Image (cartoon, rainbow, N blue to C red):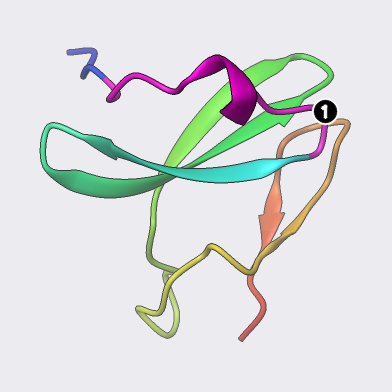
Amino acid sequence: MAQRLDAVSSEQRSQIGDLRTATADGTDVVVVRSRTGVVAYVDRCAHQVLPLDGAIVDPESGTLTCAW
């Protein structure tokens, strides 16, 4: 089931390769704009359970590489 992201103001709209933080139904997420669209991930890396807001973004695929 799709979850609603909190509204992002127009001055916060992202460019391709940008990573933004947001909240989806009370869960912290990072939102990435790639060339193919927008992807949201839970804001925790799988191996260290640390925030992804410093991750490196592949602008083509939207794939994140954890900074940890």
The residue at which mark 1 appears reads as 16
Q: Reply yes or no: does residue 13 show up in magenta.
A: yes
Seen from the viewer's position, the closer of residues 28 and 64 is: 28
Q: In this view, does 55 lie above or below 62?
A: below
Seen from the viewer's position, the closer of residues 16 and 62 is: 16
Q: Residues within 10 Å of mark 1 (few under 14, many from 20)?
A: some
Element type at mark 1: loop
Seen from the viewer's position, the closer of residues 47 and 17 is: 17
What quarter of the picture does the N terminus occupy?
top left
Magenta stretch: helix, strand or loop mostly: loop
What quarter of the picture does the C terminus occupy?
bottom right
In this rendering, position of residue 16 left or right of residue 23 = right
Residue 49 position by quadrant: bottom left
Residue with the most extreme left position: 26
Q: What residue type is labelled 1?
A: Ile
Pinpoint residue 30: horizontal percent, then vertical percent: 47, 46
Q: In this view, does 50 lie above or below 44?
A: below
> What residue lies at 59% left-to-right and 30% top-to-bottom?
12
In this rendering, position of residue 14 left or right of residue 58 = left
Pinpoint residue 19: horizontal percent, then vertical percent: 64, 45
> What residue lies at 79% left-to-right and 27% top-to-bottom?
15
Q: How many marks?
A: 1
Pinpoint residue 8: horizontal percent, then vertical percent: 44, 23
> What residue lies at 51% left-to-right and 65% top-to-bottom?
52
Pinpoint residue 53: horizontal percent, then vertical percent: 54, 63
Magenta segment? 5-17
